[in-house]
Image (spheres, rainbow, N blue to C red):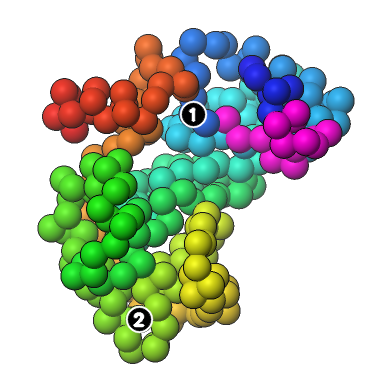
Amino acid sequence: MQIFQLFATLDTDYIDLYILHMWDYNTPIEQTLEALHDLVKKGRIHHIGISNSYAWQVAMANTIAADHGWTPFVSIQGHYNLIFREEEREMIPCAQHFGMAVTSYSSLAGGKLARSFSVDTKRKELDEYARFKYEKSAKADQKIIDREQEIAEELNVSMTAIALAWLMHKGAIPIAGATRAQQIDAMETAAGLTLSRSQIERLDELYVPHALVGVMAQNKPGSSPFASTKTDMKNLEKEGR
């Protein structure tokens, strides 16, 4: 664990929330939890979370932590957005049971949920990984994106605001970055936007099950939490996922 190097890089004495990138099959979870608990006791970390894991893994870890009096995971960070909702099957109910926060990465699906499909952007052009994650389900996803655009036009807000407001309605805390002022404005709009039950139902009703992609597709024995994105993509392509 190179966490002390991280403290130096961030120029800080502590981290509020330290999130494990994914489940580590190469290290006993007891060893990981004990090491993290020791850092919490020393005040170097205030809370711990985990990303890219199955509900049974999180439940097992928090049960083990409770049995030993160790610090439990308080948040789960997962791939969750309007066109990828597999976290709703087991992970979100698990998080609710343990009182964990849910933070969503790829909140805008690599930009797909931020603008009309007809608009070309540098993100679409350059983000090969984002395209890879959604190319298999593009036809089904487009119906949801079109519906999202309809509701955005009805409310006279951006598609970004709709996508983020939907996540917050679901109880998630969206992770989204901004490089322009208008993107910050969209986030502010989303924070104050309440979607009606009818609008939520219209956004929800077109979803179809998706295969796991990206890092979660690598959640299996023998995987490494330090594998590169490029390697992940090549392996997934070979497996036909």
Q: Amino acid at mark 2?
A: Ala
Image point (35%, 81%), residue name: 152
* Residue 84 falls left or right of residue 169: left
The picture places residue 222, in percent across and down from the top left corner, at 37, 12
> Between 103 and 7, which is closer to the camera in this rendering?
7
Secondary element at image label 2: helix
Question: What range of the chain is rendered magenta?
Answer: 7-20
Is the C-beta separation of discs 2 and 1 under 8 Å?
A: no
Residue 19 is inside the magenta segment: yes
Q: Which mark is residue 152?
A: 2
Residue 212, which numbered label? none
Residue situated in front as seen by the camera: 129 or 21: 129
- Residue drawn at x 61%, y 35% is 19
Q: Residue at x 32, y 86 (%)?
A: 153
Q: Quadrant of the N terminus?
A: top right
Q: Determine whether, in the image, residue 153 is placed left or right of residue 164.
A: left
Residue occupied by mark 1: 22
Q: Give residue 166's position: percent from left, percent from top.
A: 43, 68
Residue type, numbered disc 1: Met
